[in-house]
Image: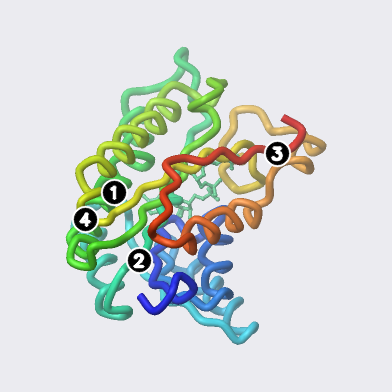
Amino acid sequence: MDSVRDQSIVVVGASSGMGRASAARLARDGHRVLAVARRAERLEELREDLWKDGQTLATCAADATQVAEVDRVIATAVEQFGRIDALVYATGTNIPSRSLEVLSAEDWELLLRTNLTGAFLCTKAVLPVMRRQQSGLIVYLSTGAVQYPDVSGVAYQASKHGLNGLSYGTRVEEKKNGIRTTILYPGLCDTEILLKRPVPTPKEVVERALRPEDVADVVAFLCTMDPRCHVPEMQLFPAFV
Ligand SMILES: NC(=O)c1ccc[n+]([C@@H]2O[C@H](COP(=O)([O-])OP(=O)(O)OC[C@H]3O[C@@H](n4cnc5c(N)ncnc54)[C@H](OP(=O)(O)O)[C@@H]3O)[C@@H](O)[C@H]2O)c1
């Protein structure tokens, strides 16, 4: 790494919302970014948007819940950049039928797989690279519902609580290798995940929510902190909460 302003960063879940805004912000700041998600056409749109502004970023269409695809993502980043200074896990989903009265075992599995197992697979795949470097940062996008339980559903909340075990456990085991982990807990943010709510969020509430760019500001701050600093967790809420 030449400096904390010249990094190689993988953003998983970069086709929309906070992940897209983070990938765009990091690329505009001059970092080498690999943007990852399943929807290749959305990643291409992001690449074209940046291109118009004279910026660039690499893309890799992949499903974060599939071991072979995650391994391919990490191999692509190493091939293109030579190293990985940070990985941002911004992947996440929820479902309308989230209350215990209607939640199915299949949907429980889907949320755990997408929100937690994918994060584990990315962590497991990137650690050998970071161990070789004796440095690296992994940022996990969680939710403020961890501190303030709400009606986002037990599967969603259980998956996000699981990220705490993953993040803190990884930090304890890998600290000796210079690897840091951060859990970021955002509150309500105006992204596509809100369309999956069982009841639409009122327009006047969405207007006062965080914007994806607000989260991107925090992600950029975390990724560019000097590696002597470690932020275990951070909360970011709309001011009205
Ligand atoms: N918006 C909020 O109010 C809010 C509040 C607190 C926390 N969060 C959390 O913030 C994170 C980002 O969500 P967002 O609000 O930005 O929502 P979003 O716009 O729906 O973004 C979700 C991202 O996850 C990706 N994704 C989903 N399943 C995937 C898979 N199997 N493999 C790879 N990528 C996958 C999606 O891309 P593809 O579909 O193209 O794969 C998309 O890029 C999530 O963890 C969410 O739980 C959101």
Q: Which of 143 and 3 is in front in this view?
A: 3
Sequence-earlier tag: 3 or 1: 1
Sequence-earlier tag: 2 or 4: 2
Tag 3–tag 1 contact (CB < 8 Å): no
- Point out the frontmost of discs 4 and 3: 4
Q: Nearer the viewer, residue 164 or 202?
A: 164
Q: Mark 4 points at which residue?
A: 177
Q: In which quarter of the image is the N terminus?
A: bottom left
- Whole-angstrom CA distance, mark 3 to mark 2, is 29 Å
Residue at 28% in and 66% down: 73
Q: What residue type is labelled 1?
A: Thr
Q: Name the residue under label 1.
A: 65
- Few, some or many C-alpha atoms within 10 Å of disc 3 (few <14, some 14-19, many ≥20)? some
Q: In which quarter of the image is residue 240?
A: top right
- Whole-angstrom CA distance, mark 3 to mark 1, is 30 Å
| Disc number placed over residue 12 in the picture, else none | none
